[in-house]
Amino acid sequence: MTAGGAALGAFAAGPAAAREHAPGPARSIRQSASEATSSTATTGDFDFTDGSAALTPDRTVATACQFCNANCRLHVGLKADRIIGVRGEKDDPVQNGKVCLKADLMPELVYNETRLTAPLRRVAGEKGSADSRFEEISWDEALETIARKMLDLRDRGEAYAIANRTTGRMPQGTGALVGRMFAMLGSPNNSDVGPVCNDAGGDALAATFGLGNFTNGYGVDAATGEQDLGAARHFLFLGTNQAETHPVTFEYLLRERQKTGATLTVVDPRLTPTGKEADRWVSPKPHTDYALVLAMLQHIVDAELYDHDFVDRWVVGFEELRKHLAKHQYTPKWAADVTGVPEVTITQMAEEYVAAKPAAIFCNAGISHQLGAFDTYRVLAFLAAVTGNIGIPGSGCNFMHNTWPGALSLPELTAETPERREALPVGPDYFTESILTGRPYRLKAVITQGNPLVASANSTRVREAFKKLDFYVYTGLFMEEPAKYADIVLPVCSGLEMEGVYMRRDDRAVRWQDQVVPRVGESKPDWEIWVELAQALGRLDKQRPAEDWTEAFPKAWTDYTELWQQFVEHTPGMGGMARDRMRKRAEPLRWPCPTPQHPGVSTLFADHPSWYEAAESLDPAYRGKRFLTPSGKVEITTRELEHRLKQSGHGALPVFYTHPEVTGAHPTLRYRKSFVTNPVNPQAVTHPVDLGVSGSDEVHRRYPLMGMTGRPSVVHFAEVTHWTRTGKQLNGVRLIQIHPRTARLNGIKDGDEVTVESPRGSVRGTALLWEGIRQDTVFVPNGYGPAQQVGDFFEAPRYEPANTLPGDSYYDNLSGQQAYKCFACRVAKA
């Protein structure tokens, strides 16, 4: 399947010996626990649902999965108006008819006895307490209660005290409605889930190339008729476990790899199913990828291995970078001391990446969830640029989960909008800091579409804040942890209960999905809730005429078809993405796609007419530009970029630092108390930092290990799948990965109940002894929470969130990313 090669990885603390690992065969991801009755009902090559009177669908509806950014098309079969099966799209060459087991969980969100079915109002009990009691109310009463609170704060000159945080589970474009409403109210705090997801990659790409999106596409580029990412000769994966997070698109890469002989290097402190497929698995210390990539870049530049022609034609600031690297001596030898990865391995990684052109870089939360996320992604972008691995098929910086396609646009507001003060800092869930300390000002009314009590770092402190919050609205499918703190609870629909565009594939590709089943109870889709909330504001607002609200949010927009047409007409680069076109396609359609005749862009920044046409559609000023920066080239450093980043304590050229709780007392950072305008997110303020501050190992006297959080397995997607029976049946126990030697030193055996403790708190789980993890590292699966009652049926424990352990005082002050990938900890038998 692949070219052979030594698979090198470092297990232990310090520069441990490399170990070999042979690549395994590509395996099918069709592994559903219930596929015998739901997905395929096959035995080998035979499908025994064919010809079955009971299991032949009356009708089949084409929709899409909501659980990950593979964005698989689903064909949902119904009998007597009940879902009886879920199958994949055979005519999509990337999907190849496959689904992962999460496809079977989609109906379990519909047929679920724990679903919220009507709006609720708090009537008794302290916020967050088990004795919180709620009563059902009408939608009109719920929305008017929220509208009155918003208008009261606005009328008192405190519109800035209203905040919303959207989430990745929402239908596309809901955020545009929220932004429109907040502009009319005068609040700057319409935030999103990016700081707990993957904003930093997009921010770094925008600073370097001019557009902050996944650069290449899965499958055949319709503009050229050639494979894009499938044409790669080398894959460099850093902090991405795609076998469990993006199984269908990962299997596509493995299928193409069998044809090309492409090599695969996986960088991850622990061996995952993704690493098992690799030619080379490398396990650095958590939170030290920045050093590893700097050393690769230094070696490529020092050894003159870079693409001289591409650099001369298309790169600004290369000579400054060369001098900067020489000055700081970020060599493979230096990086070996920081990361624990042998010097020879780092050198080989760099040379393999250069020699195998085209080479594609993939990253995910393992890089994003670091306090140096923006800077690490920038260096990865430099790595692609100096080797000419940008703007060609099979290459690029494929940083996952970047928002697509940016802000979907609606017609310009005709109503007057008040001036707004600066937004709260981006990250690390600054809502908590604002509520508890009043800095820079205090929030008083918050609406969330996600679960901040499980998703945000230092969960105990987040809980304290939400207890003290004046007014809180929770919207969701289930009575999750934050619902117990809410004043109003609003029930939303699951993906099979609505028409529209829900999830997106990482490569900017989207599918239209049709509604499969009626809405559960009185639940509503998110966009409809915001349009109707605007209508309630119109009824109650005594300062604005009602027409301001009703014209800005027409009732017709409760129909997603009408709303989507507005996005198509008003969002740059979307002229070719009409509903009817997308509904007819087996494959998703990639943005930008400016006209009905345009195939959609697969390779961003390609020297090709289809890209130049799309670029001009984004902004007429981009006409003829290959890269969408001021210079029209890749910008490593410019005077303007250096000046812009300097005020925050950063610079355009990379300076190494890492989390203070990484063992070894490496350079770290210090936050100043003042606020400045965030140069990456200029609508908000941030704390400037001092880089290169001397680190200390003092915390490791009590907490000698490093912990990291991440996806439990392929079964789960955030916390929502923990509300399905199959999810809890298959992976309802939190399995904490510990190296056998570390376990032995702490008196722990496989299967023991253990406690992991950090300076912030402790969580429990079951020990899973695993040789494929560094001896100095403990892995704590996230997504578990104390409200997840579905697991009670299987006697699965209720757990405190894994994010009790990471701190919220250290974060990326540019992108706002929270630092989940390293925290000092200790482990003991419970």
Image: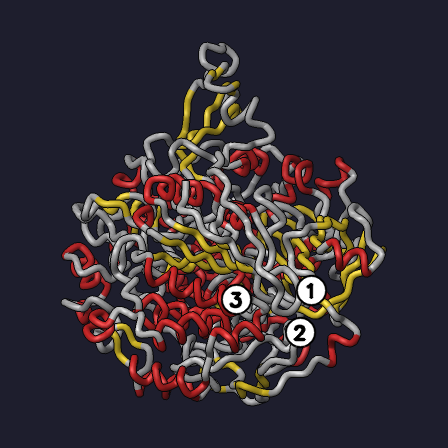
Q: What amino acid is labelled 2 in the image? A: Thr
Q: Is residue 820 above or below residue 225?
A: below
Q: Give whichever of discs 2 and 3 has the lower sequence position.
A: 3
User: Which numbered circle lies on residue 776?
Assistant: 1
The residue sitting at 40% across, 82% down in the picture is 325
Q: Mark 3, mark 1: which one is toward the viewer?
A: 1
Q: Nearer the viewer, residue 179 or 801?
A: 801
Tell me the residue that label 2 is attached to: 663
Q: Nearer the viewer, residue 790 or 810?
A: 810
Q: Residues within 10 Å of mark 3 (few under 14, many from 20)?
A: many
Tell me the residue that label 3 is attached to: 195
Task: Look at the numbered discs 2 and 1 and tell me whether their residues touch, using CB distance below 8 Å.
Answer: yes
The residue sitting at 67% across, 42% down in the picture is 731
Kindly report the distance in space between the C-alpha atoms of the residues bearing marks 2 and 1: 9 Å
Q: Tell me the SS state at disc 2.
A: loop
Q: Give whichever of discs 3 and 1 has the lower sequence position.
A: 3
Kindly report the distance in space between the C-alpha atoms of the residues bearing marks 2 and 3: 25 Å
Q: What amino acid is labelled 3 in the image? A: Pro
Quadrant of res 314: bottom left
Q: Mark 2, mark 3: which one is toward the viewer?
A: 2
Q: Tell me the SS state at disc 1.
A: loop
Kindly report the distance in space between the C-alpha atoms of the residues bearing marks 3 and 1: 27 Å
